[in-house]
Image (cartoon, helix red, strand yellow):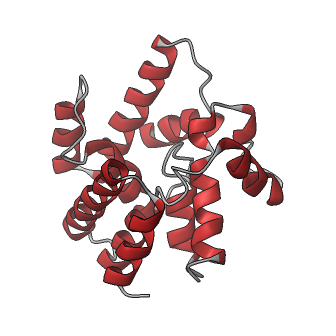
Amino acid sequence: MDAEKLKAEVGKRLPLGRFEHVLRVADEAVRLAERFGIDREQAKTAALLHDVAKAMPKDELRRLVSSEGDPQGVLDFHHELWHAPAGALIAEQEFGIRDKAILDAIRFHTTGRKGMSGLEQVVYVADMIEPGRDFPGVGELREAARESLKESVLACSAHNIRYLAGKRAQIHPDTLECFNDSLL
């Protein structure tokens, strides 16, 4: 499916504000991909689909993630994580995406993980630093992304850990492993 058709289909599934976020993430992912030598078409496709399940009801997300056996164990954590693996399933089943690299970039864009591919890193970082994001510390994350993809993943995962710990929220093990792996 070409990018324009993909945009149109994703746009039908999301509220306008979320769809605008997706478009900004796609633009940022392409910029990062070009900067760090990652396939820009894969980055654009993964970014356009990264939040395809974001507006779905929790019970439907739970059903989708459960249908795969919840291999990441996200159902034991905050429901905000559920849309990522559900989105990978939708990308595969409804959009015909067969590229494992794209599916993994969608699946791990919320938690990160140990051993992320360059494409996974690009989508993970682009989602955090897209121009519409406005939170304390986003400037530092954007600066890290100018320097190194690995450093930006480290900065983004550290930010997520601090944020969740500050809220006294559970931190998914993949996020901790992403951080630790980025230190090596």
Picture coordinates of residue 138, whole percent (x, y): 23, 32
Residue at image location 55% in from the left, 37% down from the top = 175
Judged left or right of residue 6, residue 106 is right
Return the x and y of residue 8 as percentages of the image width and height.
37, 75
Q: Nearer the viewer, residue 19 or 154?
A: 19
Q: Is residue 154 above or below residue 46?
A: above
Query: Above or below — where is 52 with respect to 174?
Result: below
Q: Kindly identify the residue that appears in the image at 55 percent across and 56 percent down.
A: 53
Between 104 and 134, which is closer to the camera in this rendering?
134
Q: Residue furthest bottom?
A: 1
Q: Residue at x 47, y 25 (%)?
A: 161
Q: Which quarter of the figure is the N terminus placed in?
A: bottom left
Left or right for 159, reference 66: left
> Residue 150 appears at what percent x and percent y?
35, 48
Say if 170 sits above or below 57 in the image. Answer: above
Q: Residue 32: name its quadrant.
A: bottom left
Instruction: Report whether 137 appears left or right of 11.
Output: left
Where residue 40 sits, quadrant-wise, is bottom left
Task: Identify the residue at image location x=28%, y=61%.
Answer: 23
